[in-house]
Amino acid sequence: MNHLDLSAGTIHYEDTGGDGPTLVLLHGLLMDGSLWDDVVADLAVDHRCVVPTLPLGAHRHAMHADADLSLRGIARLVTELVERLDVRDITLVGNDTGGAIVQLLAGNAVTEISRIVLVSCDAFDNFPPGLTGRTLVRTGKLPPALFGLFMQQMRLRPVRRLPIAFGWLTRRGDATTARWMRPILRQREIRRDTVRVLRAIAADPHLMLDAAASLPGYPRPALVVWASDDRVMPLDHGRRLAELLPQARLVEIADSFTLVPLDQPAQLAQGIREFVRATATSTTG
């Protein structure tokens, strides 16, 4: 695992290297870069995959006390990471909250981003998304110590599988979600960061509506991948995003909840590979 010291703090990331097209893959709340492990194992054969662990609750090192941990601030952190790594012509991929960050960056027309992929993610008025997101953001109103006490319940598999936790986010990924919980359960500083993220989300309820308003102006190719069985991110939102983005197409994936990289990694990897290949000429010509 590599790391960079950025303005907000130390960010860890995986970089598979290679000469293939570069993908930057973003995860969601209470997750880390391992969300993408199976997808990266497939795509790294012919792509360079850069997978940061963002300060969204499963990171290992606390951010600076004055770091902006709003989603807009974390989006700027992704831009800083890309600039520091000096990568160009990237495909920016985001699932869950990671997809919200992708939308924010698409609206800012970051020059290094040649195409985007949105995978079952926060959109429109579904922010925070579903019962899962609303419950989590409400817990952010607690002081960090009480928040940590509340989160101790996540040690138990039956609790993790509840609809208010990860039960409606993944069909098959409980072992992975259990690992994601370790930093927040063990480190006071990570709980502090997470509360700051959650409070920033609560303070900006129109964030994704504002982001959606800028998407019709996004001039580059986009792929929208949505879980057809998603209970947290409405399938209609995937279709609406594909209609808003001028150069978008929609792929629906069956037998998956929101976390498609855990539930159907092979299908997702295939869709991303075909999209990058099909759009390579239009973005480099």
Image (cartoon, rainbow, N blue to C red):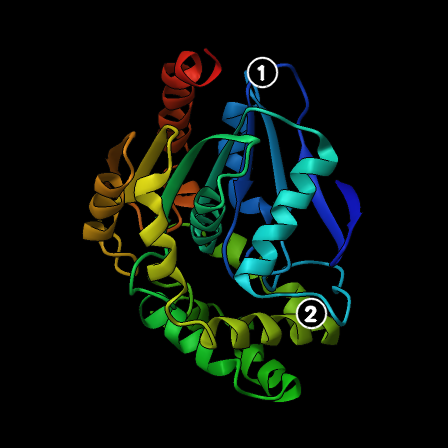
Q: Position of residue 265 (x, y in %)?
A: 41, 35
At x 46%, y 56%, the residue is 97
What mark, if any, has residue 190 been given in the picture?
2
Closest to the observer: 48 or 223? 223
Q: Amino acid at mark 1?
A: Gly
Q: Give the mark nearest the N terminus, 1 or 2.
A: 1
Q: Circle 2: is it few (<14), some (14-19), or many (20+) Cα within 10 Å?
A: many
Asked whether residue 124 appears in the rendered view, the answer is yes
Give the vertical position of 171 relative to 128 (above or below): above
x and y, in percent, of residue 116 in the image? 43, 35
Q: Which residue is mark 1?
A: 20
Q: Secondary structure at mark 1?
A: loop
When asked about the image quadrant of residue 24, the answer is: top right
Q: Taking 81 as reference, is 169 above or below it?
A: below
| Relative image position of residue 163 (x, y in whole percent) | 33, 69
Seen in the picture, residue 225 relative to 71 is either above or below; the reply is above
Question: Between tags 1 and 2, which lies in front?
Answer: 1
Considering the image in quadrants, where does the C terminus appear?
A: top left
Q: Which residue is more in the foreground, 110 or 60?
A: 110
| Residue in the image at 74% along x and 37% along y | 84
Amino acid carrying label 2: it is Ile
Which quadrant does the N terminus fall into?
top right
> Between marks 1 and 2, how big is the CA–CA gap?
35 Å
Residue 170 visible (yes or no): no
Instruction: Please indicate whether residue 48 sits to the left or right of residue 256 in the image.
Output: right
With respect to residue 8, does 240 lie above or below?
Answer: above
For residue 274, side relative to residue 88 (left or right): left
Q: Residue 46's quadrant in the figure?
A: top right
Question: What is the secondary structure assignment of the residue under circle 2?
Answer: helix
Q: Looking at the image, which residue is at 38% across and 42% down?
A: 118
State the mark number for residue 62: none
Q: Residue 95, image x and y in percent?
A: 43, 47
